[in-house]
Image (tube, helix red, strand yellow):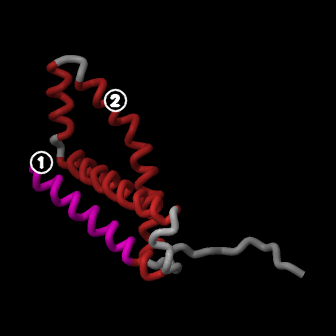
Amino acid sequence: MADNRPVYLNLLKIRLPLPGMVSFAHRITGVILFLALPFAVYLLDLSIESEQSFVKVQQLLDQPIMLLLQILLLWSIAHHFFAGIRFLLIDVDIGVEKNQARLGAWLVLLAEVLTLFVIICGVGL
């Protein structure tokens, strides 16, 4: 007789391997980017209304909390992009084996950190 009771999974006790964490972060960054879209469209609309509204948007984006949110969005874009490429490669059976998957996950993390570093140093946030 099968036990049909719900299973309690404590997500804080489950230790995902690195490829699993990259996969989970890919989903989280997708949600972050999706939720940021209305705000980004609003800021774009506000910035092209007039010169005064453009200055207002610049002042808003220069706030310390907004700088942190911009860094979070940059990380989200970088991670989602590189992890997406990794998943596309997995779809065509490249990087499916355990060692290759672990290497691919490390390469995603390295690429996103390097991209974030180049953007922050290049833009001078």
- Position of 60 compared to 81: left or right? left
Amino acid type at image mark 2: Tyr
Pointer 1 local density, CA inside 10 Å: few below 14, some 14–19, many at least 20: few
Distance Cα–Cα, label 1 vs label 2: 23 Å
- Is residue 121 one of those drawn in magenta? yes
Q: Position of residue 110 (x, y in %)?
A: 27, 69
Residue at 27% in and 51% down? 74
Q: Position of residue 53 (x, y in %)?
A: 20, 23
Residue at 82% in and 78% down? 3
Residue at 90% in and 81% down? 1
User: On screen, 104 above or below 76?
Assistant: below
Amino acid type at image mark 1: Val
Residue located beneath label 1 in the image:
123
Secondary structure at numbered mark 1? helix
Give the prevailing secondary structure in the magenta stretch: helix
Look at the image and give the residue range highlighted in magenta: 103-125
Residue located beneath label 2 in the image:
42
- Is residue 59 one of those drawn in magenta? no
